[in-house]
Amino acid sequence: MNIPDDSQIVLHRVKFYLLLFLQIPSILLYLLIFTFFITHRLQLKILKNQGLVLLLLVNFLVASCVLPMTIHFYHLSRVSPASAAYCTFWTFFEYTLNVSSEILMAIISVQRHIFILNGNLLHIRIKRILYHYVPLLFGVAYPTILYFSLVVIYYCDGIYWDFSLVLCGYANCYLKNDSMLATFDWALHNGIPIVIIILANLVLIIRVIHQKRRLQQVITWRKQRRMTLQLFSIASLYFIAWVPITVIAVIEHIHASELAAEIQSKYVVDLLYLVCLLMPLVCIGVIPELRKWIKKLFKLQRPPHNIVGPSHIANNVRK
């Protein structure tokens, strides 16, 4: 195990405080949002909210279960406990939840085209199951089965784990022993979903603007614009987190670069946590009903002002 130098320790300490500072309010906001949906069951019957709640739940698990292991590492500057079992457990949950989050976002981005431009399609029960519920179930089940097979079941003697690096150096045996499988895993489960997210959002914006010019319906346009901006606001978190990682990974695959690998491991890879940390804040900003409930809950609505008119003053003077 390599001993971190002073600069690495300082960097780890900065990351520790920054992630911890963001994690605490983020978890509180998640709990607040879940309380809203539990107490407002009708909101859960809205199809577009169901995918969003599932996405929130997955990212809540990242923030509350996976992120603490990363924060613990940055606090100690080493993996503790330093064991193969712990590294296997950590990487399984990290890979599963991050990929599930990304795939779900890609699915929701595609489904939003149906909600906005062809909503009547989902009124038919069988099509609602096929186009809405099955994809969402796939977004959670597939990564779980995949990484249980690759990380837990795949034979590994644990010789590659590096306890001086975050996530044990990403040294899973399937990544070290089979470069083709590693490339396939990255391309299919990291690269393609972010491309789908970007294209689906850009095409949706173009389609909505085109339909607005064609139909000239103000009410429909306002609803479509709100749903499009809601999706784009959430998707922007994935742009910020995944695009730099994807670009650097492509550079590394084309031409091996120690500088790119260092930038990726030291600075860029932790951008992934911005998705789970900022997700509840963005959702509060784009769901009007949730925002109104929070304002009412904390009595943030401005009370009406008591205006004293001239006639009232005059009557008091006469008295």
Image (spheres, grey):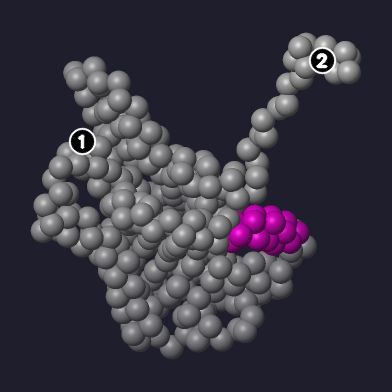
Across and down, in percent, residue 202 comes to 31, 33
Residue 315: mark in rendering: 2
User: Which residue is at 25% across, 47% downward?
Assistant: 111
In which quadrant of the rendered image does the N terminus lie? bottom right
- Residue type beneath disc 2: Asn
Q: Is residue 60 above or below residue 72?
A: above
Residue 63 located within the stretch drawn in magenta: no
User: Which residue is at 51% across, 85% downward?
Assistant: 84
Would residue 184 be seen by someone viewing this image from the given angle? no
User: Which residue is at 41% across, 44% downward?
Assistant: 235
Residue 240: mark in rendering: none
Within-10-Å neighbours for mark 2: few <14, some 14–19, many 20+: few
Q: Nearer the viewer, mark 2 or mark 1?
A: 2
Between discs 2 and 1, the one toward the N terminus: 1
What element does badge 2 sit on? helix
In which quadrant of the rendered image does the C terminus lie? top right
- Label 2–label 1 contact, CB within 8 A: no
Q: Which residues are magenta?
A: 10-28
Residue 117: mark in rendering: 1
Q: Is residue 111 above or below residue 319?
A: below
Residue 27 located within the stretch drawn in magenta: yes
Chief SS of the magenta region: helix
Across and down, in percent, residue 276 comes to 51, 56
